[in-house]
């Protein structure tokens, strides 16, 4: 499916070749996607689960960051004003959801990557994706 990601960038159609693939829509994947987007590199962001920040959703409710919010931000986006020094699990999830919507490519949810390869000179890069949606966790 192709379309707009809500920020004027064209999303890629399933099966379309793009120069880069980012696997996982957690903090690292979102930051890489945002950086590629800022550089103008077409890419796809693939996430196995049905939501960004899926690992954070599986943690216990009372979890808080062990590092303060200033040292835990992603590129170009501080935590919102009023966030406590050590944000809660739910505050981190909300922050990552907002970051994904404002900075990263629209993630393709339910896309499991089984393997990835990098081709050498004249070779073919690629990722083998599993068919169908990801199982619920």
Image (cartoon, grey):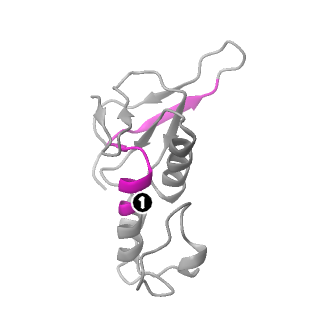
| Category of crowding for the residue at label 1, using alpha-carbon neighbours closer than 10 angstroms: few (below 14), some (14–19), many (at least 20) | many
| Rendering quarter of residue 67 | bottom right
Residue 66, x across and y down, in percent: 56, 81
Specify the quadrant of the image occupied by residue 84.
Answer: bottom left
Task: Identify the residue at image location x=49%, y=26%.
Answer: 18
Task: Where is residue 119? Give x, y as percent.
Answer: 65, 21
Residue 127 or residue 100, whichever sits in front:
100
Q: Is residue 123 left or right of residue 43?
A: right
Q: Is residue 72 toward the left or the right of residue 82 in the image?
A: right
Does the stretch in magenta take in 29?
A: no
- What range is drawn magenta here? 97-118
Total count of labels: 1
Q: Is residue 30 at least partly visible in the picture? A: yes
The N terminus: image quadrant: top left
For the point 50% across and 46% down, the residue is 33
Which quadrant would residue 83 be assigned to in this image? Answer: bottom left
Residue drawn at x 38%, y 59% as measured from the top left = 54
- The residue under label 1 is 99
| Residue 119 vertical position relative to residue 29 in the rendered view, above or below | above
**Which residue lies most toward the right here?**
121
> Is 52 left or right of 39, judged from the image as shown?
left
Mark yes or no: residue 58 visible: no
Question: Residue 95 appears at what percent x and percent y?
Answer: 40, 68
């Amino acid at each position: 499916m192709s379309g707009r990601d809500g920020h004027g960038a064209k999303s890629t159609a399933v099966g379309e070749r793009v120069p880069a693939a980012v696997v996982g829509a957690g903090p690292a994947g979102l930051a890489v996607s945002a950086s590629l987007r800022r550089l103008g590199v077409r890419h796809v962001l693939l996430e196995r689960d049905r939501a960004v920040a899926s690992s954070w959703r599986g943690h216990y409710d009372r979890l808080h960051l062990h590092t303060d919010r200033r040292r835990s931000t992603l590129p170009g986006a501080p935590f919102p004003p009023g966030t406590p020094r050590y944000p809660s699990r739910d505050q981190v999830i909300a922050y990552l959801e907002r970051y994904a919507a404002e900075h990263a490519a629209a993630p393709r949810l339910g896309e499991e990557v089984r393997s990835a390869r990098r081709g050498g000179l004249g070779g073919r890069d690629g990722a083998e994706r599993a068919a169908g949606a990801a199982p619920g966790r």
